Amino acid sequence: MRQEEKVLQNIDWVMVMLYMVLVLMGWFNIYAAVFNDSNQSIFDTSQSYGMQLVWILTSLFLAFIILVIDGEFFPRASYVIYGAFVLLLIGVIFFGVEVKGSKSWIGVGGFRIQPAEFAKFATNLAIAKFLSNPNLKFEQLQNRAIAIALFAFPALIIIAQNETGSALVFGSFFLVLYREGLPGWILMSGVVIAILFVITLLVPTDATIWFIIILGVLPLIITTLFYRRILQNFIIAVAISIASIGLVFSVDYVFENVLEIHQKTRINVLIGKEKDLRGAGYNVNQSMIAIGSGGLIGKGFLNGTQTKFNYVPEQSTDFIFCTVGEEWGFLGSIVVLGLFIVLLLRIIYVAERQRSPFSRIYGYGLAGVIFFHIAVNVGMTIGLAPVVGIPLPFFSYGGSSLWSFTILLFIFIRLDAYRFQILR
């Protein structure tokens, strides 16, 4: 029998088992989040936990289909899949269904599907295809620009759907570019920009002029004290000063003229400029109360009072982690986060053993997307990140989310199983 036919022998069962454990834990936590005495059966499809079981079973079917597909299909069809989903994203703007102010859904019978979720795996395939070209010289500026455009373009379309949270996830693909040779100073520049963004919002209006003066003078002082006084260093310092000052003005303009009122309020609440416990800060405040009340070992399965009495909005979707914290406590939360960390480390380990650059790059894209989701989702439940509506992988309720993460993961598992067919 050809090795291609021995799919079950070659797949990475560690990742499969971690996937199954996380999905089942997510299902039980969804049950706990919306449990009521009148509907106690976990298989009741009239409730969200019953429907989640349907999504789990269909996800397992999708996983099986992916595992039996020829190993060369995904590299060959990458651009076609990417193009199809970009067109679908554009179509959603005109023909989609609006849900909670976001026109990012497609109605299919009695169900709704969010193409933005599936665009993640399509974009990951396209980036892996582009960067794995043996003739590509990634150090060339135009090639780096194309790679960035591959994930920036769908992100912009998703922003046009008023789905900013999903669009932000595409920024995780910068980690892939860094792994493939993008200079570290570019990532550091992003960190510095984020810090300046927050400081600009925190600085009082009457002190803005002094902040601008400091940004203009500080790079010149540092250059004078620590670097040789050559023309090149001086020009770089001046450029940094101008860019920093420009960023301050840009932040003020965007914050006042581009962001919606509720977005500005959420940011002000996050950085501590406002307290709105009955409005924009209500979700996070109730989530933190729920997690804090769990203590060390939690209140026990189905005993979460914050959860049971619906104090936390969206508790089965965006705020599912607060159910973990309340019912299973600090130790349970550590176990869940530990499983996610093990999965991420396993993905990176498997990515590094690939013989195909395409598979390696895809693996890092997968790790980046999952890490971003975990960091932002958990961060917003404990007040460290803005509430942007990002689900917790394999845990949050929803067919689109579970399907997309299943497809993302099992494409990588299939690519890994095919590695034995690739000669070095």
Image: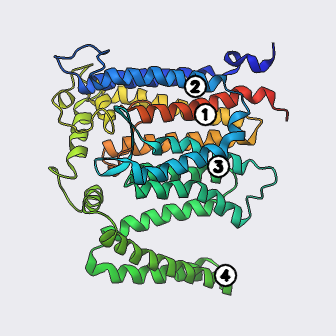
Mark 2–mark 4 distance (CA, rounded to whole Å): 52 Å
Q: How far is disc 1 from disc 3 in space, using C-alphas? A: 17 Å
The residue identified by callout 3 is 127
> Percent from the top left, x then y, of residue 68?
66, 22
Q: Are marks 1 and 3 in contact (CB under 8 Å)?
A: no
Q: Position of residue 169 (x, y in %)?
A: 48, 49
Query: What is the crowding at mark 2: few (fewer than 14 residues within 10 Å), some, or many (at least 20)?
Result: many
Residue that numbered label 4 is attached to: 228
Horizontally, is 276 left or right of 377 in the view? left
State the SS at label 4. loop
Q: SS for tag 1?
A: helix
What kind of residue is marked 2? Met
Question: Is 314 in front, or is 383?
Answer: 314
Looking at this view, is 313 or 324 the one in front? 313
Q: Is residue 295 left or right of residue 364?
A: left
- What colour-coding does the image apply? rainbow
Identified by mark 4, the residue type is: Arg
Q: Is residue 36 above or below residue 341?
A: above
Mark 1–mark 4 Cα distance, whole angstroms, equals: 44 Å
Position of the N terminus by quadrant = top right
Q: Does any portion of residue 201 appear in the rendered image?
A: yes
**Marks 1, 3: nearer the viewer:** 3
Q: Quick one: label 1, few (<14), some, or many (20+) residues within 10 Å? A: many
Q: Residue 79 appears at what percent x and percent y?
A: 66, 47
Q: Which residue is mark 2?
A: 15
* In the image, residue 77 above or below residue 306: below
**Which residue shows up at 29% across the image and 16% down it?**
44
Question: What amino acid is found at the position of numbered circle 3 in the picture?
Answer: Ile
Q: Nearer the viewer, mark 2 or mark 4?
A: 2
